[in-house]
Image (tube, helix red, strand yellow):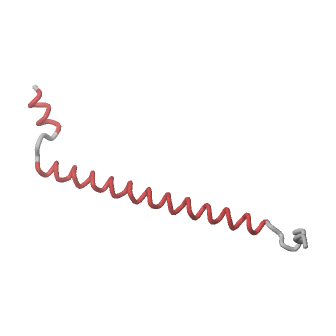
Amino acid sequence: MAKALLGYVGGSDPRLLAEMRRLQQRVQDLESELGRIQAENDALAAAASHDRIMESIDAHQAEPALT
């Protein structure tokens, strides 16, 4: 029965194995790209946040430094 189930699921068909390896590699590639894009997005969000903070500081209304 196990042999029948194994054959039914796909067994060791070389085309199926090659396709499965190709798809696994594609998933790895996409996960790597997703990680890179998320890191880039985090860096851009941090930079935008920093820019908003700097824009919110009004140099004309700031108190003068002590002399």
| Of residues 3 and 34, the one drawn nearer to the viewer in this rendering | 34
Quarter assignment of residue 62: bottom right
Determine the residue located farthest toward the front in the rendered image.
Answer: 67
Q: Say above or below: 50 vs 18.
A: below
Q: Say above or below: 46 vs 7.
A: below
- Locate residue 10 relative to residue 39 in the image: left or right: left
* Residue 11 placement (x, y as % from top left): 12, 40
Quarter assignment of residue 1: top left
| Of residues 13 and 25, the one drawn nearer to the viewer in this rendering | 25
Determine the residue located farthest toward the top in the rendered image.
Answer: 1
* Residue 61 placement (x, y as % from top left): 89, 70
Q: Say above or below: 1 vs 47.
A: above
- Locate residue 34 relative to residue 54 in the image: left or right: left
How many marks overall? 0
- Locate residue 25 relative to residue 17 in the image: left or right: right
- Locate residue 4 relative to residue 37 in the image: left or right: left
Point 44% across, 56% down: residue: 35
Point 60% across, 61% down: residue: 45
* Residue 16 placement (x, y as % from top left): 16, 48
Point 23% across, 55% down: residue: 22
Quarter assignment of residue 54: bottom right
